[in-house]
Image (cartoon, coloured by chain):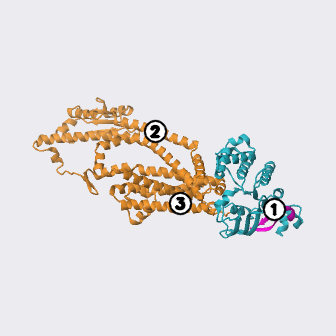
Amino acid sequence: MKRFTNLLKKEIKELVRPQLIISLAFTVLLFNFIGQVSKKEVQKALGVQTISALDQDGSAASQALLKGLESAQFKVLDQSGKTKEQAIETAKTGESKLLLVIPPGFGDSLRNLQPETIETYSFMRTFSLIGARGQVVVRGVISALNEALSNSFLKEKLPDLDPQSLKNPIKSKDFVVVRDRMAEGSASMVAGLISQQSLLIPVVLMMIVMYSSQMVISAVAMEKQNKTLETLLTVPIKRTSIITAKMLAAGLVGLISAGVYMFAFKGFVGGIGEEAARAGAEAGGAALMRQLGLTFDTTGYLILGLSLFLAILVALALAMILGVLAEDFRSAQNMIMPMMFMVMIPYFISLFADINAVSLPVKIFILAIPFSHPFLVSQNIYLGNYGMIAGGLAYMLVVFVVLVVFAARVFSTDKILTMKLRFGKKKAAVA
Amino acid sequence: MDNVLTVRGLKKSYGTQTALEGIDFDVRAGEVFALIGPNGAGKTTTLRIVATLLTSSAGDITFLGRDHRKEPDFVREKISYLPEEAGAYKDMKGLDYLHFMANFYARTPEEEKDFVDRAVAITELGDRLKTKVGTYSKGMTRKLLLARALMTKPVLAILDEPTSGLDVLNALEVREIVRRYVREGTSVLLSSHNMLEIEFLSDRVALIDKGRILDSGTPEALKEKHQAKNLEEVFRSSLR
């Protein structure tokens, strides 16, 4: 145990270098900074926005439209008395994001039930989505006005009837059924909320696999490059202890690094997503998910944690073998690519398709990748597919054991010194 | 004199390539035994097998009366190996490196201190041991590694080309250190293609070429047998 601790300490010290600490601190600060800037932009976009309005009509109806915009947190700059071209020029040079042109006769047309056109000119000084939000809100206001005007007209002409019933004779009431539970809500809302809840799983997995694997591969490759491996292999410590020490050190440092990056990432996403999340909660999303039983309890989190942990172990064992194949630090960097693809394939497929619904060969291919299983765990927990979960966990465990046995065999035989993979070159003869 | 190491019929192949074709030799207690021969003769392969890094394809090795293949952990406790192109962890300070290596062998903190003190004395690097290994010259690194190999007073020190790449003065110092430690009871198995160095350092030598031992004995006996002035001439004579 003393020898193992000695080696483990050395491995951790080699990984936790000033460069790593500086890089982590820099990322936290940078993400936090971007998050704060984004948050301000979002607040600005959600706050009072300046638009210009050229009211060429001056009727009560046009004034009502502008008042409606003011109540929707718009600061309206009046361009009355100008021509359309002059108004466009003035608005373009000012701070207005949008110019609204209400044509002459707008009020009269509405009274005579003639459709009238309002022109909007958006000044795109940036191509960000937040920048284009002004026009969306104006459309919302116009739509609300349309609704109010048509309602008042119907009320006037058919006072005994409810305008809503006339406009929408068929109404729908949406229910979502998940297993034995049912709740009122839309399927798209549930799918959206689930993907929001599960968003962090692939990100966490990718981060940890990326960092830990890179550390293990580099740790073995650096021993080879610095010519320290041969000496290490002749000291009185079991080969399995060498493997375990390297994997454990990389796992611990990778976990902490990923944790720090996640913290930084949360600061970044938090800046943008806070408002949206609040809106989702207000819309009753949380209550709907609770009613459908689509929330994680302690067991759920434990299963998810176990699945992530097994995926990390598989990644570390695989990285250990790849590290042996690498000749030096540079080739170790190439070795990490296949592992990245193995994590990215299930990630992208889970973004665009339902893994459970793809064709059988594709499904077998995806399930054969050990890293696919943590992606599937959360939806399998929600859907009660415990057999699938147990199968996934067992499969990852088997893959891990096979890889560790293989790695131990490689470390205990000549292969540790003779096995190598060169890109674009023939296998080297051993001296 | 008892044998520390007995090697019989040692063979090693890498796929279709044969590195050793069945070699025999013994290392006695308290002697320096050298394998000499040109590059690619099989010296490093032999040392790597004895150091438990490689496994033999055939043959028997007995170390301190025990089966070398069956008890690699026992062998690793009693030997130390200095590879030809060995390096030390560049980000470690010299002293930390010695403590790290001593920790694998020492049973108590006192023993660890003894090992490190001995290594510090061997290196003669003084305060430079408090700086990172990455800043050392080749000679300094080699002395550090040799000190690491000898500090535990191993039963058998396996030194592959111990003076490889060193200048005349550093090579001389390394040879003197090796001789001094043999007097303290460590047996040495070393390899070199520098035959003059071997003549100065070794008690007995084996001439090896293309995976076969051509001849073996004390340098004096070999010179007399082949009527040669030095081991280089002995080697040339053995090849005929």
Chain B: its colour in the image is cyan
Percent x, y for residue B174? 78, 51
The chain displayed orange equals A
Could you tell which of marks 3 and 2 lies nearer the N-terminus? 2
Decide whether the magenta segment is chiefly helix, strand or loop: strand
* Chain for numbered disc 1: B
- Residue beneath disc 2: A32
| Residue placed most toward the observer, A2 or A33 | A2
Q: In the drawing, does residue B203 fall left or right of residue A78? A: right
Residue at (46% x, 56% y) in the render: A310
- Pointers 1 and 2 in contact (CB under 8 A)? no
What amino acid type is highlighted by mark number 2? Asn
Give the position of the C terminus of chain B as an image quadrant. bottom right
Q: In the drawing, does residue B57 fall left or right of residue A241? A: right
What amino acid type is highlighted by mark number 1? Arg
Q: Residues within 10 Å of mark 3 (few under 14, many from 20)?
A: many
Q: Residues within 10 Å of mark 1 (few under 14, many from 20)?
A: many
Percent x, y for residue A328? 62, 54
- Residue beneath disc 3: A404
Q: CA distance from mark 3 to mark 1?
A: 44 Å
What amino acid type is highlighted by mark number 3? Val
Q: CA distance from mark 3 to mark 2?
A: 39 Å
Where are the magenta residues, as a range? B204-222
**In the image, farthest residue toward the left:** A160
Residue at (58% x, 63% y) in the render: A409
- Residue beneath disc 1: B204
- Pointers 3 and 2 in contact (CB under 8 A)? no
Name above or below for residue A372 compared with residue B123: below
| Magenta stretch holds residue A86 | no
* Chain for numbered disc 3: A
